[in-house]
Image (cartoon, rainbow, N blue to C red):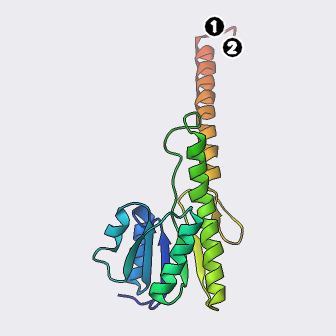
Amino acid sequence: MSARFADKSVLVTGAGSGIGRATAWLFASEGARVLAVDLNDGVDETASGHGGIVAMRGDAGSEADVAAMIFAAIAQHGGIDIIAANAGISGGRGGLFELGEADWAALLRVNLIGPFLAIKHGAQAMLAAARAGAIKSSRPKSISISPFDTPLNAVFSIVLMIASPMIAVSREAQTTRTRNRLNASPLEK
């Protein structure tokens, strides 16, 4: 076992499955003390049998929950050194025309506001304790801007949802034009 992160306090959001779970496991295997946070039951499985990982239920898009996560990491580990703001949801409930306002608001709350809250509260705690730290927000297929690599998953998701019907219409139009050319007489070509 490597000890690259020995005695480092790490908070991982979205740790109930996928990349968040793998991130929590990797940090723990490297010697970190990890607070794994997620809304779903999978976070308990993430912590189960993995020394150095404590599970906590919380909503990465809720300011009160994010503040509580930071407080819990400090209380349990004596501070916070690293935050992996990994929680995220997709607009996978349907395409642009099926997505409701509440779904869009949830997407923005978790994917955009969540990393902002992690940065806001995490950096504040790190500065107050005069600890150098790292805050990383990472999501597949995200577009990163700003010095904080804030993911624009929500924007990227809406672009994909808007583009999908347009691509389908464009493909249909192209197919129709091609068929018309193939069916036209040699003089019409």
Q: Is residue 49 above or below residue 13?
A: below
Quadrant including the N terminus: bottom left
- In the image shown, does 183 or 10 lie closer to the viewer? 10
In-image side of 62 versus 14 (left or right): right
* Residue 142 seen: no
- Point out residue 60 in the picture as x, y percentages from the top left corner: 53, 64
User: Which element type, helix, strand or loop, lies under badge 1?
Assistant: loop
Q: Residue at x 62, y 59 (%)?
A: 112
- Point out residue 8 in the picture as x, y percentages from the top left corner: 48, 88
Q: Is residue 115 above or below residue 158?
A: below
* Residue 75 seen: yes
Residue tagged by mark 1?
Answer: 185
Q: Is residue 111 above or below residue 26?
A: above
Quadrant including the C terminus: top right
- Please name the amino acid that badge 2 sits on: Lys
Residue tagged by mark 2?
Answer: 189
Outermost residue, front direction? Answer: 64
Q: Is residue 75 above or below residue 145?
A: below
- Point out residue 49 in the picture as x, y percentages from the top left corner: 27, 77
- Please name the amino acid that badge 1 sits on: Ser
Residues at circles 1 and 2 in contact by the CB criterion of under 8 Å: yes
Mark 1: few, some, or many residues within 10 Å (few <14, many ≥20)? few
Between the C-alphas of marks 1 and 2, the distance is 7 Å
Where residue 24 sits, quadrant-wise, is: bottom left
Q: Residue at x 63, y 33 (%)?
A: 166
In-image side of 128 versus 50 (left or right): right
- In the image shown, does 103 or 85 lie closer to the viewer? 103
